[in-house]
Amino acid sequence: MTAERIGFASSGNENLALGAKLREAREYLGLKQEQVARHMALPRTAVSEIENGRRGVSAIELTKLARLYQRPVAWFTGEETGAGVPADVAFLARTASALSDNDRQELQRFAEFLRTKSKVPGDGQS
Amino acid sequence: MTAERIGFASSGNENLALGAKLREAREYLGLKQEQVARHMALPRTAVSEIENGRRGVSAIELTKLARLYQRPVAWFTGEETGAGVPADVAFLARTASALSDNDRQELQRFAEFLRTKSKVPGDGQS
DNA sequence: TAACTCTTGTCGGGTATTCCGACACATGGT
DNA sequence: ACCATGTGTCGGAATACCCGACAAGAGTTA
């Protein structure tokens, strides 16, 4: 026993969540693990293990990854922003602010569509 | 050679800056390294080494420390916030928002005083 | 189906970083 | 001088990470 320091310790769960978000951000940009690995000067397998929650991520690594993925660090840590707004909402707001009026309207309609849909019980998922 | 993974790697410098900020935040609250260590379930010496830049900090550790120190993670990473405002400015804004109107006015006057002073030729640098 | 490509997941041995107690160095108070 | 408190540092043991090699899964082509 006593087999954990950074990879599993009190964080067991949290590394999984962090890895999932890192993967989501990477795939959103269409990047391969290998590209990220080169950018970070890391072995390719490390990226894989990170995204699967089997390897910890240092604060500095996370900062660099956040820059690469063009998201605030808070989006990955899940913390709340200054105003008490969840980080992901703040990030959405920033993204939306860069859109044209038309695109923003469309985004709004889609958001409302999702809201409506979530209220309906049945429906097949994915 | 090649003696680095998380503690010194490409970050050599950055861990020093991060450690300094962590120390500043801790001392601002008047906490002892031992208290932080207990809160983090870490050896007391680890906190010392972190603050001196001789030990890396995991992303999850930083998240917990940020909560403990009551500051946004971005304040430690030095990244920019959603609006493009430096994190420390955002933090100042959040702090100021908790002040009374009078105190905020005074803070504002002091800020303007500092700005004016920096414009004057004589005077010390930065 | 077989064979090839591309991307990602996993294993094993070697190595670096961290853990953890013990001790040293301040500083402050009696 | 003697404690007490808070922090820095050393040394060996524990372990997380590096890194190449190989396997699994999905697409493609014939």
Image (tube, coloured by chain):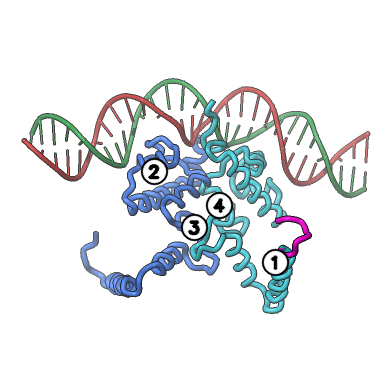
Chain colours: A blue, B cyan, C green, D red
* Label 1 – label 3 distance at C-alpha: 30 Å
* Label 2 – label 4 distance at C-alpha: 20 Å
Residue visible at 26% across and 70% down in the picture = A121
Specify whether residue A115 is in view: no
How many marks are shown on the rendered structure? 4
Residue type highlighted by circle 3 = Ala
Residue visible at 41% across and 48% down in the picture = A19
Labels 4, 3: one chain: no
* Label 1 – label 2 distance at C-alpha: 42 Å
Q: How crowded is mark 3: few (under 14 residues within 10 Å), some or many (20 or more)?
A: many
Q: Name the residue under label 1.
A: B115
Circle 4 sits in a helix, a strand or a loop, which is it? helix
Placement of the C terminus of chain A among the 4 image quadrants:
bottom left
The nearer-to-camera label among 4 and 3 is: 4
Q: Mark 4 points at which residue?
A: B77
Left or right placement of residue B7 versus residue C14 in this view: right
Q: Disc number at residue A36?
A: 2
Q: Residues within 10 Å of mark 1 (few under 14, many from 20)?
A: few
Chain ID at mark 3: A
Residue type highlighted by circle 1 = Arg
Labels 1, 3: one chain: no
Is B99 included in the stretch rendered in magenta?
no
The nearer-to-camera label among 4 and 1 is: 1
**Please, what is the dominant secondary structure of the magenta stretch?**
loop
Q: Residues within 10 Å of mark 4 (few under 14, many from 20)?
A: many
Circle 1 sits in a helix, a strand or a loop, which is it? helix
In the image, the segment drawn in magenta is B119-126
The furthest residue to the bottom? B101
* Label 3 – label 2 distance at C-alpha: 20 Å
